[in-house]
Every structure is written in C-alpha cells, then in structure tokens.
Image (cartoon, helix red, strand yellow):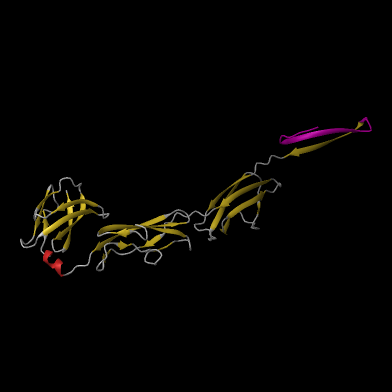
Amino acid sequence: MSVSAPGTYTVFYTTNGACSNTANFEITILDCTLSASAVATNVTCASDTDGSIELTVTGGTLPYTFAWNNSATTEDVSGLPVGNYEVTVTDARNCSVIVSIEVEAVDNVDPVISCLSDQTITLTSGETTYTVPDFVGNGDVTATDNCDGNVASITQNPAPGSSLSQGEYDFTFIATDLAGNTDECTVKITVEETLGLDDLSLNTLSIYPNPVGNLLSIELPDYVELEDMTIYDLTGKEVMNINLNRNQKQIDVSNLQSAQYLVSIRSKNGAKVIRRLLKK
C-alpha cells in the first residue's frame, strides 16, 4: 500500500494466510505547510559588520526553532559581515524548510575630493610654456571616502607633463572609489608671462565694447605702436591672430563664436597685455 496525500488511513493485514487474524491501524499523514522567506539589509563597506537578516515564517505548527549556519538560533539575525547565510526552520511537527540569502556590500556614497584653488602661474624670464605638475602625486589634490582606503584613483586633466602656453585653462580632477562612485572638481589656472617695465606702457589699454558684437575697438595712447593681437579660447587654443603693424584700432570679430576669450595684445617694443573678452 502506498499513500502520499494528507489524511487518515485504515490498514488491514493477515497472518499465516488466516483471514481470521486481522487487525487495523490508523495512519495519519500530516501536511507540512511550513514556509519561510528572508530580507537582507546589506552593509555599506566590505569591512562593515552591521548587516542584518529579517526572517518571515508562515504555516506549520508553533513553536518554531531556528538553526543558522553562523550558530545563531534566533529568528532574525544582526551584526553580520558580508557573506552567505542559511537557516533551517523547524516546526513542532518536525517539518522543516531551508532559506539561503546573501549579505552584500553596497556602497552608493561618493568620495569627497579636496581640490586646488584657482591660481595664476607667472612664467620666469625666458620661459615660453608651463609644464603641468602632478598635483595628485604632489598631494595638492586628495580625496577621502566613507569606506577606508576605498579611493581607487584620482585623474587629472590636463595630464602631468603637459606643456601649456600663455592662457587660461580649466583643470579637472575626478576621484573614483572601488564601488565606481565619483566626485569631481574644476579649477582655473592662468599662465602668463613675466611683466617687465615695457609692459607698463600698455597699462592703460582697453578694448570695447565688452561684450562685443562684430567690431572690437582698441583704445590706448597714440604713442604706443602695436605689433599684433592674438585671441585664445579658454582652453588656450589660438582662434585668431591679427597683424597690427598699421596701428589698427578696430578689429572685425564677427567670425568668433559666442563665448569667453583671452585677448593678448603686443606692442612693437615687446610689451604685452592680456584682456578678457566676451563675444555675444
């Protein structure tokens, strides 16, 4: 005889082939309706031990017992590090169910970058370019993270070793932690030449209107003879160069895109002045 469904059954049997020797037994098959599920609270950092698991048990017959693979015997567990956890739940009728769940490290917190201040670099006499240092390697730019030692990298652009001519540049630094979270900062570094006495003759120079539409005017004393004017975008790229040998005082800038620029004006005696220009 084979039975599997829950219920009560009567069994008859004979001994020695004699039908007169009979007896009956009642066999009850219980339905194990026990079930369980778990929800984990993950840790933020791999070294943390504040994870927890909340267990929900339904069905079966009270009381329940709990046997965790970390030796805990309570329904819910806390103070957990990263790992795989398993619990066997058993009810009063010895029905049991096994639940497995993982506690993971889930870091959604960005690192915090500590950046440079805006600065001006003055080239020494004879220098024409500025060699970009490794601000990260020098310790001028640093970053911290909520998980100790979790800052994977700090990138710098322009890269260390780059050569920059006179102009204004945006330096970008990006810190990335081991979970891929990032923080970014940008500083302006202006590279300019050393000013000598000859430059004093251009101190009164002005350009107008500013912002400018199509025609830019230069105003300065008549005794100052100009050589040329070079316009740079804020990445330091030259976008226009005008020969001013005829002491030209009005410049057509209609081809410039609407943006901010640096204007370098040089006199015949080598003096130079830089002005900021906004193109409408």
Query: Can you give x and y, in whole percent of width and height, for residue 259 in the image?
Result: 21, 50
What residue is rendered at 60% in x and 52% in y?
Answer: 84
Q: Quadrant of residue 67?
A: bottom right
Q: Quadrant of residue 18?
A: top right
Depth order, front residue of 167/45:
167
Q: Does 45 appear in magenta?
A: no
Query: Can you give x and y, in whole percent of width and height, for residue 52 in the image?
Result: 55, 56
Left or right of 171 on screen, residue 207: left
Q: Is 139 drawn above or below residue 260 in the view shown?
A: below
What residue is rendered at 16% in x and 62% in y?
Answer: 273
Left or right of 245 on screen, residue 45: right
Quarter of the image with the N terminus in it: top right
Q: Residue furthest left?
A: 222
**How many numbered dots are placed on residues in this image?**
0
Left or right of 139 on screen, residue 208: left
**What stretch of residues is rendered in magenta?**
1-19
Q: Does 17 appear in magenta?
A: yes
Query: Can you give x and y, in whole percent of width and height, for residue 146 in the image?
Result: 45, 61
Query: Can you give x and y, in whole percent of width and height, for residue 234 in the image?
Result: 25, 54
Left or right of 24 on screen, residue 238: left
